[in-house]
Amino acid sequence: MRKSVRGPALKRPRIEELDCPVEVRRHPGARRLTLRVSRTRRAVIVTLPVQCDLGEAGSFLDRNIEWVRERLNSIPQPVQFVDGERLPVRGEFHKLTFTGRRAAGGGVVRAHRTADIPELRISGREEHAPRRLRDWLAEEARRDLDERVQVHTRTLGVKAKRIAIRDQATRWGSCSTTGVLSFSWRLILAPPRILDYVAAHEVAHLAEMNHGPRFWAHVERLVPSMKEDKLWLQHYGLELHRYGPTAD
């Protein structure tokens, strides 16, 4: 298996102006310098052959700075978890309120407001509120996904070993050969039907570990709106990666 070695970030003035991290990766199989921009992490990634030095990588990056700038400008700006910000939960926007006070019975409470959008009240010290909110969202995602996975596994007559909630940058879900289903916590930000589609997609892999016709037939049986849900993720999924405790 090929190994990718991540080197130190390039500290070059023109890159600092772009306000994004730069990752340098040495790859034994690389024959030339390559450059890409991660749309989910808003990071610039330079891959170079093992024998290439950092100076050459920096020059390569300088020569392509306008290309990088264009790609970064096309990525939606990140939205941090801060007091007063708006965050979608199950497809509905909520206002974040950091109370700064301890509250009995939990750190995050959903409240309805008559003249405004619903509110998420995060109690406790303000510096801990973003992490507390992220943990709460992950648990909400786990609860919803566990419910939908149970429904879909019963329908197909298959069994999942367990569910894992992660912050996956390149996929919304995955199914291991041992039956472990992994999902992105960000699915809780999307409308419930989108979370349900991803749950059905991964459950279908318990029956078919491929993307052949029988696999897609299973998915469509579980969620007849499969085609529309898949298009939604393609068009709006990147928006869900905007939100997080800190800027990537």
Image (spheres, grey):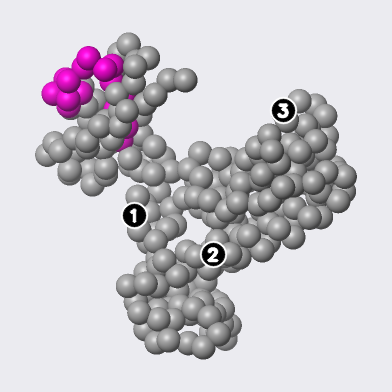
Q: CA distance from mark 2 to mark 3?
A: 30 Å
Q: Residues within 10 Å of mark 3 (few under 14, many from 20)?
A: few
Q: CA distance from mark 1 to mark 2?
A: 17 Å
- Numbered tag placed on residue 15 in the rendering: none
Residue 54 colored in magenta in the image: yes
| Residue 60 percent across, percent down from the top left | 21, 22
Q: Is residue 19 left or right of residue 85?
A: left
> Residue sitting at 66 percent across and 63 percent down?
143
| Residue 192 percent across, percent down from the top left | 68, 59
* Mark 2 touches mark 3? (CB < 8 Å): no
> Residue sitting at 75 percent across and 56 percent down?
148
**Residue range (magenta):** 44-59
Looking at marks 2 and 3 on the same chain, the residue that comes earlier in the sequence is marked by 2
What residue is pinned by disc 3? Answer: 210
Q: Residues within 10 Å of mark 1 (few under 14, many from 20)?
A: some
Quick check: 123 above or below 133?
Answer: below
SS under mark 3: loop
> Residue sitting at 79 percent across and 46 percent down?
159
What residue is pinned by disc 1? Answer: 247
**Amino acid at pointer 2:** Leu
What residue is pinned by disc 2? Answer: 137
